[in-house]
Amino acid sequence: MATSDLRNVLRYVPQFRDKVFVIAIDSQVVADDNFGNVLLDVAALHSLSIHLVIVHGASAQIREWSEQLKEAVTDADGTGPCDAATLRIARLAAAQVGNRILDGLFGTHELRGAVPNAIKAKPAGVLKGVDHLYRGRVDQVDVDYLRLLLQHDIVPVIPPIGTDGSGQPYRLNSDEVAEEVARELQAVKLIFLTTKPGVEVEGRVLRQISSRDLEELLDTRRDQFAPAVVSKVEAALRSCKGGVRRAHIIDGRVDECLLSEVYSNEGIGTMVHANEYQFIRRAQPRDVSFIWALVKPAMEKEELLRRTRASIQKQITDYYVFETDGAILGCVALHVFSEEKKAEMASLHVSPLHENRGIGTRLARYVEELARKQGVESLYCLSTQAFSFFQQKLGFEEVSPDFLTTDRRAKYFQSARNSKVLAKSLLKPPAPIPAG
Ligand SMILES: CC(C)(COP(=O)(O)OP(=O)(O)OC[C@H]1O[C@@H](n2cnc3c(N)ncnc32)[C@H](O)[C@@H]1OP(=O)(O)O)[C@@H](O)C(=O)NCCC(=O)NCCS
């Protein structure tokens, strides 16, 4: 990994510190050769002070036990009727999977884990005339118990089995358990580890999609979704509606699947994001540290002109930030030179993890509009590496450094960065903003 990549990753470490991730692991992923690597990722996330809760399935092991014991099961997935024999096998299989996870956590990584009886169940009942017997639904999640374990650095490992108030166990669907646990704990992420590359539609994996768009897609093109993924998509959508910010559906058989999904720009599977509250606002003095953390690596890569933290602090009222759910993902500054009717757009920067989502364009258009309102006739910017972005996406044209305001021209030659100077006339009406 290049130093710059590592820096990018490390910058996002504080964002997830002390946050809860729920990791829902399919039974086939536990049985796969890559499972040891999944636990390596779990240990790495845990070492970054992320509170992890594991919820696991057991259908593959239920099928194995059914064959070994030569006892038929009424349903292996926790979605159909569950008779007494199936429940017995499901408990056996769930205990086996739970032990495998606990052994792996402790044996390889000395992580403490526990299988808590934190899920109160209720019978699924008679559905469309069919008695589902010992198949249950989640009635309540014992949030206090789970929080207590997390506070003591213990990873809860939750099976697809719950118990009702009289002590009767029920077979549960693990996707539903994971979703309920994530919602109740207000997890920031619910990550499904499956044996599919993500949500595929017409043979293409959807990389990032809002819960609103995914819901619409499921309503209109349900037949194109793999049946195994539908239950996860529905659980992901419910969790997003219930306050979980991101749900991910990824292939748990890929090495470093969890780390790649959480910390790489592209991710490896599908990320569903809640319909979040996004806006651009003028920066406040309290934002200086965030802006500084955002732009510093870009200055080191010479993408942005070097500034000191003190200079940002001094000019903070010129800065605007793009905020999503309380996190600053991008910034820009607008320095207006009223006498010359010119303004500089500076420090346009978007966090590398959130590039290519239209944030840079929105920030730039926002300050362009502000400049227009203030009677600015020409907007310019300096760029060493993103000049084609300004030309192709924002309608700027390259001009000579002589175009700069007097004060700025002196600094330009002083810095010797040899940036390209780009300018745009604001006397023409603004170009229409593309949808999305
Ligand atoms: C340049 C930057 C602000 C773009 O922000 P962004 O939010 O990723 O951009 P958007 O999502 O609005 O636009 C994405 C489009 O711009 C293109 N683009 C992004 N960065 C680009 C660059 N450096 N050069 C050319 N094109 C670029 C993308 O390929 C994409 O094109 P498409 O729409 O045809 O697929 C961001 O990459 C960044 O912060 N770069 C480092 C700092 C920098 O160079 N700032 C400019 C100097 S002031």
Image (tube, rainbow, N blue to C red):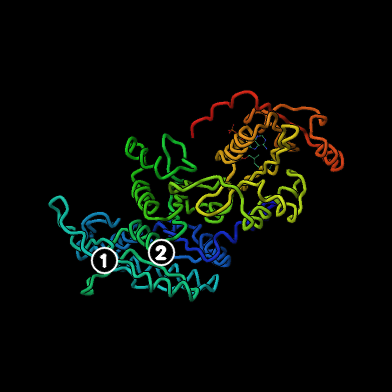
Disc 2: CA contacts within 10 A as few (<14), some (14-19) or many (>=20): many
Name the one closer to the observer, 297 or 372. 372
Residue 363 in the image: x percent, y percent?
A: 60, 40
The residue at 40%/55% (across/down) is 243
Q: Can you see residue 297?
A: no
Residue 13 in the image, given as x and y percentages of width and height: 60, 60
Counting the numbered discs, the total is: 2
Q: Which residue type does callout 1 highlight?
A: Ala
Q: Nearer the viewer, mark 1 or mark 2?
A: 2
Measuring 71% from the left and 41% from the top, which residue is drawn there? 335
On the image, which quarter does residue 48 sit in?
Answer: bottom right
Q: Which mark is residue 185?
A: 2
Residue 378 visible at all: yes
Where residue 237 sits: x, y (%)? Answer: 37, 49
Q: Nearer the viewer, residue 23 or 285?
A: 285
What separation in Å lies between label 1 and label 2 (alpha carbons)?
17 Å
Mark toward the start of the polypeptide (1 vs 2): 1
Could you say whether the residue bearing mark 1 is in a helix, strand or loop?
A: strand
Q: What amino acid is at disc 2?
A: Leu
Give SS at disc 2.
helix
Question: Going by the image, does 329 lie left or right of 51?
Answer: right
Q: Quadrant of residue 416?
A: top right
Q: Where 307 sits versus 53, above or below?
A: above
Q: Indicate the position of residue 62 as horizontal and vertical percent values.
A: 31, 61
Residue 286 lies in quadrant? bottom right
Farthest residue to the front: give it.
339
Q: What residue lies at 45% left-to-right and 71% top-to-bottom? A: 102
Q: Quadrant of ligand 1?
A: top right
Q: Is residue 414 left or right of residue 326?
A: right
Residue at label 1? 121
Disc 2 within 8 angstroms of ligand 1 (CB): no
